[in-house]
Amino acid sequence: MNVFIVYAHHEPSSFTSAMKNLATEVLSRQGHNVTVSDLYGQGFSAVAQKWDFVTTSGGHFNYMLEQKHAANLDLAFSPDILGEIQKVKAADLVLFVTPLWWSGVPAILKGWFDRVLAMGVAWDGGKIYEKGLLRGKQAMIIAAAGAPAEFYQLDGKYEATAAELLRPLNHATLAYCGFDVHEPYVALNVLGVNNTGRTKLLEDLRFRLTNLTSSPQWLKKF
């Protein structure tokens, strides 16, 4: 299986980086082909711009329609976008390894979704969810959150679980494009736990990754 890891953290010594390294190790040992995009390391731009395309259709600029125009011209995207699209197309499983910031993902990863999951490539008119252009592929979010676990409860500070905070991304982005979406793995309280606690969080992730293909945990279909 081809695994593509999209990694969104700027610090190599971070817990998020440790999760990315663990995912690479576990899945490689299982015999899968693993490719990693280090978004900060490669200087990926989060901003959707006119120069994301080799050529444009002219007239009023609508970013999504220009994506479709580029897709119809044999993927006439800028090299940074084209490289990521090719990795997605080659992948059977895409893992997004990211911190949880402001109840969402960092701007650099949001920009990756905006620019790479392009109209005409990942979805199109009438081609969403079960008809999405990326159907048959799997996706999973692996996230690190700094706040204590008790914050992520219906009666906690955030009045939502971590999975609920990620639902718009899982359902309205990944599933929208046709991905079969795994239940996310979210490591909570990574800023508050000690080394023993961090080791436990990584072991829990190791278990999920080890059993990811043999015993997948899917999000409820809506």
Image (cartoon, rainbow, N blue to C red):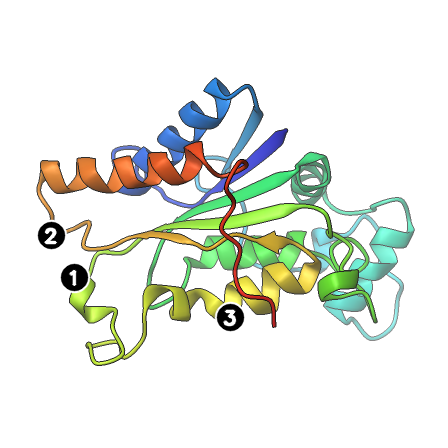
Query: In the rendered view, does 193 fall on the left or right side of 147?
Result: left
Q: Residue at x 78, y 71 (%)?
A: 61
Q: Residue at x 39, y 64 (%)?
A: 163
Query: Which residue is tagged 1?
Result: 148
Location of the C terminus (image quadrant): bottom right
Query: In the rendered view, does 9 fall on the left or right side of 196?
Result: right
Query: In the rendered view, does 214 fall on the left or right side of 52?
Result: left
First along the sequence among labels 1 and 3: 1
Query: Decide: marks 2, 1 in contact (CB < 8 A)?
Result: yes
Q: Which mark is residue 192?
A: 2
Residue 217: x and y, percent?
A: 49, 51
Q: Residues within 10 Å of mark 3 (few under 14, many from 20)?
A: few
Query: Decide: marks 1, 3 in contact (CB < 8 A)?
Result: no
Nearest the viewer among 140 and 37 is 140
Q: Residue at x 43, y 54 (%)?
A: 184
Position of 55 relative to 15 (above/below): below
Q: Which mark is residue 139?
A: none
Query: How many angstroms separate mark 1 from mark 3 (CA)?
Result: 22 Å
First along the sequence among labels 2 and 3: 3
Query: Which residue is tagged 3?
Result: 168
Position of 5 relative to 115 (above/below): above
